[in-house]
Image (spheres, rainbow, N blue to C red):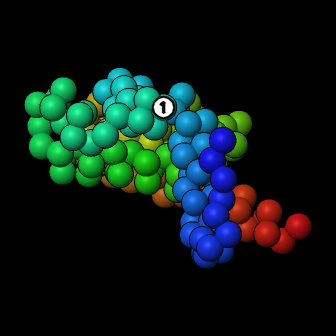
Amino acid sequence: MKRTHENIPDQVRVLDRSHRDRMEMLRSRLCLLSGADKVLMTMYVQNGISFRQIARVRGVSETSVARRLHKIARRLTDGQYIRCLRNKKRLTPEQMAIAKDFFLKGTAMSRIAARRSSSVHRVRGALRKIRDLIDDTAAQKTRS
């Protein structure tokens, strides 16, 4: 078992703890992903495979793998889609699908519109309603 040395500053211990907490959050939210994003994050978070090894397997550069993983991690940890899941009863199935595509997968509004046989204007309106709902529920929690 590893011991913590007495001469390690408290700041390093706090950073280590916050990194561990973030990794645990990512592990718990991996089930929200699907497809290639889920495979990439599972390789990195659960199996501890490095950017270089993932890049070799995929046949792309190490920086593109790192950039992709950081984007996915940022979307998983920012919590916007989680707030949508918490308010699932107040959103329509179409709004939930749009929220997943936009907040979790990072899909552009034009692609969401094409996939849903809709217009960009309609997708933008749905996202505005979703954000307003999220902001309202967050404001209500801070009041109580």
Q: Secondary structure at mark 1?
A: helix
- Relative placement, left or right, of 98 versus 50 is right
Is residue 74 shown above or below 5?
Answer: above
Please tell me how many numbered marks the rendered image carries.
1
Q: Front-most of 132 and 24?
A: 24
Is residue 144 shown above or below 3?
Answer: below
Q: Position of residue 96 (x, y in %)?
A: 53, 37
Q: What residue did someone put label 1 on? A: 46
- Relative placement, left or right, of 112 versus 83 is left
The quadrant of the rendering that contains the N terminus is top right
- Residue 15 visible at all: yes
The quadrant of the rendering that contains the C terminus is bottom right
Residue 50: quarter of image? top left
Q: Measuring 43% from the left and 48% from the top, which residue is drawn there?
A: 73
- Residue 97 visible at all: no
Q: Position of residue 21 (x, y in %)?
A: 62, 52
Residue 16: quarter of image? bottom right
